[in-house]
Image (cartoon, rainbow, N blue to C red):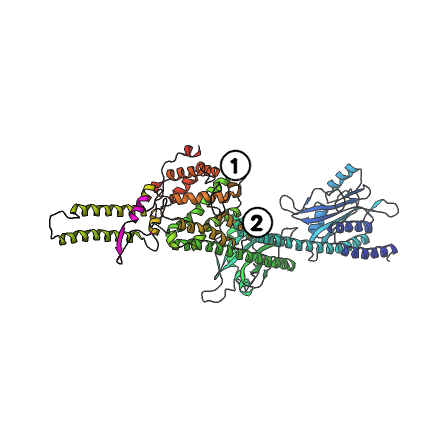
Amino acid sequence: MTRPEDLQRLDKLIEIGIALSAESNPALLLERILDSAQELAHADGGTLYTVGDNKVSVQILHNDSLRIRMGGSAPEQANLPDIPLFHPDGSPNLNNVVTCAVHENTTVNVADCYAPGNRFDFSGARRMDRQHGYHSVSFLTVPLRNHELEIIGGLQLINALDPVTRQPVPFDTITQRLIEALASQAAITLTREQLIKRLERLVDIGIALSSETSPVRLLELILDSARALSHADGGTLYAVQESAVTIQILHNESLGMKLGGTAGDASSLPTIPLYRPDGSANLNNVISYAIHKGTTVNIEDSYSPHDEFDFSGTEAFDRQTGYRSVSFLTVPLRDHEDEIVGALQLINAQDPISRKVVPFDATTQRFVEALASQAAIALTKEHLISGMKKLFEALTRLIADAIDKKSPYTGGHCRRVPELTMLLADATHAETDGPFKEFQMTERDRYELEIAGWLHDCGKIATPEYVMDKATKLECVFDRIQLVDARFEILKREAEIAWLKQRYLNGNAPEQPSVTSADLAQTLRELDEERDFLRRANTGGEFMTDADQARVRSIGRREWLCDGQRRPLLSENEVLNLSISRGTLNDVERKKINEHIEITIDLLNALPYPRHLRHVPEYAGGHHERMDGKGYPKGLTREEMSVQARIMGIADIFEALTARDRPYKSGKTLSESLKIMAKMKREGHIDPDLFDVFVREKVYLRYAERFLNPEQIDAVDEGALLG
């Protein structure tokens, strides 16, 4: 017959179940479970355990007589030793009452832990008794099962108290049934919380996937997260490539195997053909089947008979490694266009307690499918970003190639300056003391500077070829020195004709001709000398004297017959160009070619850069500035320029000095180039500290060994340059 107090306890159990289902705070939920169990059982103490990673851990411990509250909302956490589920030899730990209840999935009711012949080891309880002056007698330990009947924890009560005498008594049968019912309700609520935690973990994984920028680490994160969510011993990530599936990453914990990703190349592993030799779909392989059908494949036991799938490859792998591949979960990965881009396969789900291989349950499958969806989105994002990055880099190099096609004399410059820029930037980054000890670059910083290097002269695409490739002073569409040569030939012909006419009119008379043969010869020599002088002047050079410039003007005043009129030998434009003191460009042309930097800045500022490339216009547009503010186009001083822009200025100058593909000069040697740059350092043209790094760290030599002719690499007096 049911006692009234038992009916009251049943009503109380119902109230507790309602209260538990409404509790949303996990810590308070665990506490309410334990407090409710103690109230129902009139227990003096109790402990709530959770199961995971081959051990049982104390979450909350209460004891009313000792006034102990640990864990939960109590300020003191339950930092008690974990109880191992297995002995060192791998056998289950059945000596402890809690681990026995977990392993055997049954309630353990001990009337008196001090009674002789007890099969459990209560040394820990007795040690606590001695320490606190307590006397542990009766124990009731109930496993907590989730909705799939998996053990997720344990509830242990200590010392049922007689309601009248308040003395410890055994836990009776009705109390045991009530606590088991409570444990069932509690386990359902705990399962709900665990599912919420798994969902939160899935969200955290999704956030981590979306923020990962390394393609290799992204793939590993996907695989490791899937294994953690499913308790899988192994897993493989596959990618679809044309008509085959290739292994990207393979991990197996039991075998200690890691292939692909950060661990190394996985390309040696065999690929899986998506089609048979006759062109039909390969549906015998689990991976290719999942990809063709676009569906998840869940295999409970690969060694049970399967008419549909061929596991001969898996069995061969098992024989070779001594492994046993049992349960499989294969999920296809779809991109944003619903195309299958790969597959995620997990092997051997493991029971969290026994670590035995079990099938992948339906809940785990749904979580892995959700993760696969997030992973596919992350992979697609990474592929799109990678594709855009490659396209941007290709367009960047396309501009340099376009300049190369337009001008073979500067195309090499556009390719070499980025190389030299990064050599100097890395050397500056490595400085541990001095003015650049704080200068550091991340990989993104390096990429930004390299892109700026490739684009630093992109404005030259709008510079006229006759200016950019002007090899001589008179070159325009063609070298007008040829016209000057023709005029000299006309002058020589006129002198010869005048001499011949005189001889004819005088009848070859010997008496005092106005132009003698010697005069003619002298005139021809003078014309040849002047023509040769103009040819030399036309080639350009480092410096043209005032006397030579005056001689150009004097020669230009000679007259020659053209269209029946006497005209100056040289036009004003020809005199202007032949009198250029340095190089081959006149002031108008130099201004025109200098405009390339303004065009470069305008072009680069018009691009919508991502955040990590926002400094490209500044770096690329500052390589013609000077440290003293006398450069162009903005007249910036050293303090107004970034280190990167100053680095690029040095790279641009050194490349130009040593370049051997210019039409108007030969490439200078290292010693000549560095002496010129040392003077530029003293005159405030280039950054003196960066030039010292350039010399001291032998950046110039590393560049020379890659790009200069052997005859250009001569001895350099670094001491004199750094002094």
Q: Which residue is drawn at 25% across and 55% down?
A: 561
Q: Residue 629: where, in percent of width, then height?
A: 49, 42
Number of the label disc, if any, that sits on residue 435: 1
Q: Position of residue 552 (x, y in %)?
A: 31, 46
Can residue 150 be seen from the camera position used here?
A: no
For badge 1, the amino acid type reads Pro
**Amino acid type, residue under disc 2 in the picture:** Ser
In percent of width and height, residue 184 lies at: 75, 55
Magenta-drawn segment: 550-571
Which residue is depicted at the point 55% across and 48% down? 256
Q: Name the residue under label 2.
A: 254
Question: Quarter of the image containing the N terminus?
Answer: bottom right
Place of residue 499 in the rendered image (x, y in percent of width and height, measured from the top left) = 17, 51
Residue 554 colored magenta? yes
Q: How crowded is mark 2: few (under 14 residues within 10 Å), some or many (20 or more)?
A: few
Quadrant containing the C terminus is top left
Q: Tell whether 451 sits left or right of 470.
A: right
Q: Which of 87 and 374 is in front in this view?
A: 374
Q: In this view, does 444 lie to the left or right of 362?
A: left
Can residue 358 be seen in the rendering of this structure? yes
Counting residues from the start of the chain, the first of labels 2 and 1 encountered is: 2
When the figure is inspected, residue 77 is found, relative to residue 275, above or below; the finding is above
Q: Is residue 637 left or right of residue 484?
A: right
- Real-space Cα separation, disc 2 to disc 1, in angstroms: 53 Å
